[in-house]
């Protein structure tokens, strides 16, 4: 029973983060559009609400490029590891189904953010 609650909590956390980031991107694009005196992303749906979903569909349907002389394993798993590291930072925020209790949360934050450099290399 506890394992199911932890799984549901993590699933809700991941979905909340993904939807939150999508709409924060929409907010940023709209704000930059108003700063630059143009309309911004308001073509899809009412006031551009469906724009993040349109961007996601466009992202997944783009043509995949393959590097010729590189390590395929690190090329494909680097974004996955970066995504996992960014989700690990969200563990620090307290919520109802908290799995871990952090006494050294600042140290954990610095460790996880410093590991993000390796995904760019």
Image (cartoon, grey):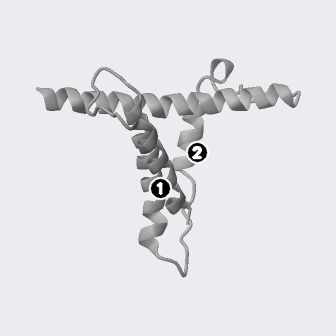
Quarter assignment of residue 22: top right
Q: Residue at x 87, y 31 (%)?
A: 36
Quarter assignment of residue 63: bottom right
Q: Furthest-right residue in view?
A: 37
Rendered image: mark on residue 30: none
Circle 1 sits in a helix, a strand or a loop, which is it? helix
- Quadrant, the N terminus: top left
- Residue 6 position, x and y percent, is 22, 30
Q: Earlier in the sequence, mark 2 or mark 1?
A: 2
Q: Which residue is mark 2?
A: 58
- Residue 97 position, x and y percent, is 27, 24
On screen, residue 39 versus residue 116, left or right, reads right
Number of residues whose C-alpha sits closer than 10 Å to that of mark 1, classed few (under 14), some (14–19) or many (20 or more): few
Q: Is residue 77 above or below residue 22?
A: below
Q: Furthest-bottom residue in view?
A: 69
Q: Which residue is mark 1?
A: 115
Q: Is residue 101 above or below residue 70?
A: above
User: Marks 2 and 1, how far apart in space?
Assistant: 29 Å
Quarter assignment of residue 28: top right
Q: Residue at x 72, y 32 (%)?
A: 29
Q: Residue at x 33, y 34 (%)?
A: 102
- Quadrant, the C terminus: bottom right
């Amino acid at each position: 029973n506890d394992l199911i609650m932890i799984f549901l909590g993590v699933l809700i956390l991941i979905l909340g983060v993904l939807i939150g980031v999508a709409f924060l991107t929409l907010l940023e694009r709209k704000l930059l559009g108003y700063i630059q005196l143009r309309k911004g992303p308001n073509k899809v749906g009412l006031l551009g609400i469906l724009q993040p979903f349109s961007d996601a569909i466009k992202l997944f349907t783009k043509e995949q490029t393959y590097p010729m002389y590189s390590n395929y394993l690190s090329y494909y798993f680097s974004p996955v590891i970066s995504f996992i590291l960014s989700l690990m930072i969200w563990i620090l925020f307290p919520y109802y189904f908290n799995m871990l209790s952090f006494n050294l949360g600042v140290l954990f934050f610095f460790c996880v953010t410093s590991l993000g450099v390796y995904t760019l290399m």
